[in-house]
Image: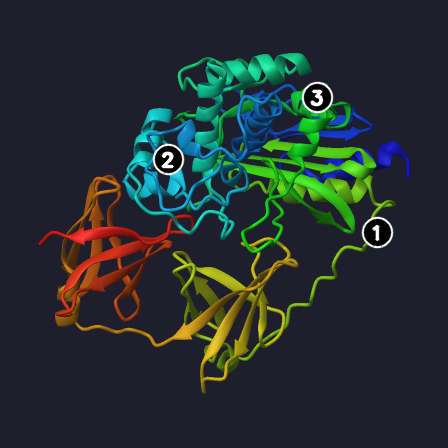
Amino acid sequence: MAMDSRIIRTNAVFSDYNRQDTPGCALSIIEEENIIYKQGYGMANLEHNIPITPSTIFHVASVSKQFTAMAIAILANEGKLSLDDDIHKHLPEIHEFDNKIHISHLIHHISGIRDQWSLLTLSSWRMEDIITMDDIFELLKAQRELNFKPGAEYIYCNSGYTLMAMIVERVSGKAFPDYCWEQIFKPLGMRNTHFHLDHKQIVKNRADSYELDKNNNLKKSVLSYANVGATSLFTTVEDMALWDRNFYTAKVGGPEVISMMHTQGILNDGRRIRYAYGVNIGKYRGLKIVEHSGSDAGFRSNILRFPDQKSSIIVLGNLSTINASQLCKKVADIWLENQFLEYLPKLEPIVKIEPESLESLAGIYHNPTLQATYVIFCKEGKLYAQPGRNIELTPLSKERFKSPQYSFDTIIEFKPTQTLGKKELHFMISDEPAVIYHEVEPYEPGEEELTQYTGTYYSPELDIRYYILLEEGKLQLKRIKYGKTPLIPSFKDTFTVGNNEMRFVRDEDYEVTGFKITTGRVRNLGFIKMD
């Protein structure tokens, strides 16, 4: 197919952003280590009418992690640290848990350490606050429990990469941004790339961050991070192409380090996970891929590499609704269409389901390991899931559903159980094992029963008080900065609060003595009832 035709089709992928009234994306397409097409779509700054170009600098969020992993790999290859080091060798301030946490656990997100962003939010920080390395470290030092035994599970954890940046500093004797500049960015010629530790630093040609409010009006999405390791890399699609080339040339790190970067984590039971050194190893349409995405404020980023084809696609964006990973794959569908080993998955047709059938699926579904609950309900002939917000489920059959708010390969399926009248909700993503939620008895407490839960609660690990109030027959959680949030009963002693689950605990006299709160990346963080 002619080059011009592929460019036309590629530009069509970004047509929603190729305007002067919207934020957008920068794109680079790489073949055989060279950029063969690059383009900007939309605006870097709406207030001053500055367009996005391939030289526009973006905050790339978690795409930063592969650079932090590279820094650790370089030091390990030089013998200055070992991946088997107990983290306390370098970070003695962290609480010493019952099981040792190794640097390799941090790399692969299998340490069990609680995630910093969830902890900060639970501590009533806002993500637009200025968040420093010291702020994060103080919070991590105060933690006295892990989500799980190190090596037992994989849960994505930003804290591990912040700690890795600190280890790089202590081992190398240099500030982390300086070390990465000297060892990675400068040798590769990445002149427009740096780790952004000073939130006041002026950066020419950088994009602003935007989001849509509930009325679909564009607003600025504020980001004032002053922390590095897990995030805060500033770069361009042009510089990222130089980084991509290094995976073939090994100019920085050498073959040993490049091999390490592709080493996937292994759990205690021998299972291999997809996550390697700041990248995921997988397949797309039959071809091996190395990929990572990023999401902070309104910034969205993704780098998708097909190593066997020596082809990569990089998308950096500045609007929160952009799905950079999906855009990369759509571009890959164009430029690699004759090399794929598998066809695109056929979309199951949407069907019409009678309201009675939908009503039969309504209920409360709980996963005891994740301490997470889905409330499924019907409204105006449609089925919704409520893990904090209403997500419409589109029927593919009487049992199978999808949602445009999840990735295209996510399926929710309802299955009967051996318990009469009870069902299971299977949350399935691609070829990964299903996450199973079990139907539980609904809890409808009266006002007198709800009074048991009211009071002041304190968390020593967060050093914060929560207040649970009873107003007009309903429980409310009150905390600083966030105001009041309703507690929605799930089942006995368990409530949903936003996207989180709050489970109250009782003593031998059946008196409420506290609660444990669980988010997606923090499990069973305890609060003690004070009155």
Q: Do the residues under discs 3 and 2 have CB atoms within 8 angstroms?
A: no
| Figure coloring | rainbow
Marks 1/3: CA distance? 28 Å
Q: Nearer the viewer, residue 426 or 176?
A: 176
Query: How many residues crowd around disc 3 within 10 Å: few (fewer than 14), some, or many (20 or more)?
Result: some
Q: Position of residue 95 (x, y in %)?
A: 32, 37
Decide: is 442 above or below 73: below
Q: Secondary structure at mark 3?
A: helix
Going by the numbered disc 3, the residue's amino acid type is Leu
Tell me the quarter of the image containing the N terminus. Answer: top right
Q: Nearer the viewer, residue 188 or 299?
A: 188
Marks 3/2: CA distance? 31 Å
Apparent side of residue 505 relative to residue 65 in the rendered image (left or right) = left
Marks 2/1: CA distance? 42 Å
Q: Earlier in the sequence, mark 3 or mark 2?
A: 2
Q: Earlier in the sequence, mark 1 or mark 3?
A: 3
Q: Between tags 3 and 2, which lies in front?
A: 3
Q: Secondary structure at mark 1?
A: loop
Figure quadrant of residue 288: top right
Which mark, residue 242? 3
Q: List the residue tagged with mark 1.
A: 341
Decide: is 444 above or below 431: below
Q: Secondary structure at mark 2?
A: loop
